[in-house]
Structures are given as C-alpha cells and as structure tokens.
Image: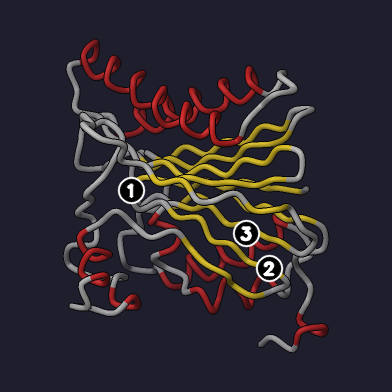
Amino acid sequence: MEYSILTKTGDREINEDSVGAVVTEQGFCCLVADGLGGHDRGEVASALVKKTGIELFETMGREDTLSLKDFLDRCFTEGQSCLLEKQKSADSEMKTTLVVLAGVKGSLQWGHIGDSRLYYFKNGRMMLHTLDHSVPQMLVRTGEIKEKDIRGHEDRNRLLRVMGNVWQLQKYELAEPIREEEGQAFLLCSDGFWELIEEKQMVHFLNQAESPKHWLELMEEAILKNGQGKNMDNYSAAAVFFGKAGKRKKFFGIF
C-alpha cells in the first residue's frame, strides 16, 4: 500500500480542511474532513475530528482483534462526541464533514458524512463514489436533476447531514467491506477538490500516474486550471494505491 495526501487553501484566507493518514502493524487509515465555511471555526472542527480518528486508529491498531466496523463506528461517534463538547466550551456551532478509509488484514471499508467523497477505482476504471448528503444529491435521487448537474448547482453547499449537528439516529454511512486487491486505487477528497475535476479526468490521470503523489499532482494541475477566476475553495485529498494501480493505459486501452 502506498499513499499521499494534499491540502491547499485555494483562494480563501483559512484552510478549513484537514487530512490525515496513519499506518500501524495492523493496518492503515486515511481521513479527509472539511469544516463548514458558513459556521464559526470550521478549521477547528475538521482538525478535531481528524485528530480523534487518527488517535483512535493508533490505539485500536495495537490490538490483534481490531475490527474495521468497530473502528469506523467509533471514529464517527467519538468524533461527534468530541465535537459537541468542543462546541459547548468554545460557544460555537462548528461543524464538519468526514470521509474515512481503513484497511486491516486484507479487508477494506469506508464511511462518510456530508459531501466529502471517496472514489474507488480498480484496474484503471472507476467503480463507484460515495453519494453526498446534500440537497442536490437528494434531487438526483428523486430524478429532478442528473448526477452531472450537482457540480455548480445553486444548492450544492446545502448539506443534510454533518458532524456537529445533534443526531437522533445514525447519520453517517458505512460501506460493506471489500477485499484488498492488486490494482485498486482510492481517492478521498473535499468538495473543493472534486467540484473542479470530473471523474473522466480522474481516470485519465490515474492511468498516467506512477504513484499516488504523481496522481494528485496531475489532478491538482487540472483543478488549478479549472478553478481560475472562481474564488477557489480549500481543496484536499488523500490518494491510496494497492500494487500497480496507475500506469495501466497500455494494458486496458483507457483514454
């Protein structure tokens, strides 16, 4: 497994995104959190939730019985508890999104809340991405708009689920676990990243990339070009390769 992380301020004064990764003897974990810009101290919220998740994996990662589902459940619930306590002490309504990918003993699983996304690629092709907890995504589900219309939608920043709101029921989503395999690649990113690069470009650059770092560099170049004059938001990402996930164009004929 090889990974790389990226987080940039864009055209904003403060970077409210937080990205983290940790590798232990038992496995690995990557997280991306995006503090809500319309609320006070978004950067504090995202940093706190990231820190909670990383420290939790480091602690649980010392246990031979580490369960992916247990970790992910605790990552979201304990991060939420810490954030609600911080809101009280700071007298702030700080909120954040969160997307997490973790791997243990050949199994992979992820979870998310808000509109920070995970993209899953295999052998140079996109398999899926998480669905946003947002108004535009809801409109896609009801057939009122198409998936491609989410980017640039007037209500794109209206989120229906985030960390920092009181939950009566579980608000985060967990995917079913999958097996780790050669040729897999994952991209975790904030909306400031994915809104300025389409999925076909992600695939195109993946099949040119020699490493996760190279993949992020290629995508960042496109993001900066596409974001010129648009008051770019913070943009952040974590890229993960298993085996030779990039440089597959000549084998799969992808263009």
Question: With respect to residue 148, does 50 lie above or below?
Answer: above
| Element type where label 1 sits in the image | loop
Residue 55 on image: x %, y %: 57, 20
| Residue 131 disc label | none
> In the rendered image, which residue does mark 2 sit on?
122
Residue 17 on image: x %, y %: 42, 41
| Residue 114 disc label | 1
Quarter of the image where one finds residue 245: bottom right
Q: Are marks 3 and 1 in contact (CB under 8 Å)?
A: no
Q: Amino acid at mark 2?
A: Lys
The residue sitting at 33% across, 68% down in the picture is 229
| Element type where label 3 sits in the image | helix
Quarter of the image where one finds residue 71: top right
Q: Which badge, 3 or 1, comes first in the chain's sequence?
A: 1
Eye-nearest disc, 3 or 1: 1
Question: With respect to residue 133, does 253 lie above or below?
Answer: below
Residue 185 on image: x %, y %: 67, 60
**Within 10 Å of the Cα at label 3, are there few (<14), some (14-19), or many (20+) other Cα atoms?**
many
Q: Amino acid at mark 1?
A: Gly
| Element type where label 2 sits in the image | strand
> In the rendered image, which residue does mark 3 sit on?
216
Eye-nearest disc, 3 or 2: 2
